[in-house]
Image: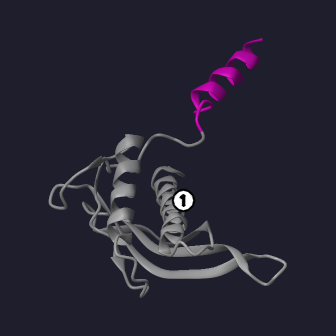
Amino acid sequence: MLGFLVYACSFYGCGAYGFRPSNPPEGIRTLYIPSFQNSSGFSEANIIDNFTIKLKDLITRDNTFLLADEKIADGSVRCTITGVTDEPLVISGNETVTKRKITVTVSASFRNLKKDKEIWNKSISNFGEYNSSNAGFSERDLGVQSAIDKISNDILIELTSNW
């Protein structure tokens, strides 16, 4: 019986209620996140702002880190959009593309500013789908936003996991 209690206490005490630990890396409580950069050549007007706002919003809502100015932050996350591909996903019987897939790749680095040491540097890709129609770029914008949402969540998971 005592063995069961020790097992149960250690199991429930180790984060059984969540999917990831809630502790940030040692000594990093505040983050500086500058605007994303774009070296992809993709000319969507709001992609930089949409990415930056989405990532900051996720980090704020997650409540693991506080956002801060670079001069006082413990760590920084810098991201560059390095690639965007747009390709057919579904082709109907009459050779018409009905759905497309847009894949976005971001280079992200997480740095301990107090120790001037890189914690990680990763390439993160994800995608969004959209209907191919005569509606112009409005449908594509939905696919881009879906990719932004997924990548921002992937970056948050990388920031808060494995500590």
Residue 34 or 65: which is nearer the viewer?
34
Identify the image quadrant of the N terminus.
top right
Rendered image coloring scheme? one colour
Q: Is residue 91 left or right of residue 133?
A: right
Residue 54 or 144: which is nearer the viewer?
144
Residue appearing at x 51%, y 75% in the figure? 136
Q: Is residue 112 left or right of residue 109?
A: left
Q: Name the outermost residue toward the left.
A: 71
- Displayed quadrant of residue 12: top right
The amino acid at mark 1 is Lys
Residue appearing at x 39%, y 57% in the figure? 55
- Residue at label 1? 150
Query: Where residue 27 sits: x, y (%)?
Result: 32, 49
Query: Where residue 147 sits: x, y (%)?
Result: 53, 65
Image vertical order of residue 19 relative to residue 69, above or below? above
Few, some or many residues within 10 Å of mark 1 (<14, 14–19, 20+): some
What kind of element bears circle 1?
helix
Q: Name the outermost residue toward the front.
A: 134
The span picked out in magenta is: 1-18
Q: Name the outermost residue toward the bottom.
A: 41
Image vertical order of residue 69 relative to residue 8, above or below? below
Query: Where residue 42 sits: x, y (%)?
Result: 43, 83
Image vertical order of residue 120 relative to residue 61, above or below? below
Q: Is residue 131 left or right of residue 144?
A: right
Residue appearing at x 46%, y 59% in the figure? 152
Residue 20 lies in the magenta stretch: no
- Displayed quadrant of residue 111: bottom left
Residue appearing at x 46%, y 54% in the figure? 156
Query: Where residue 45 sits: x, y (%)?
Result: 34, 75
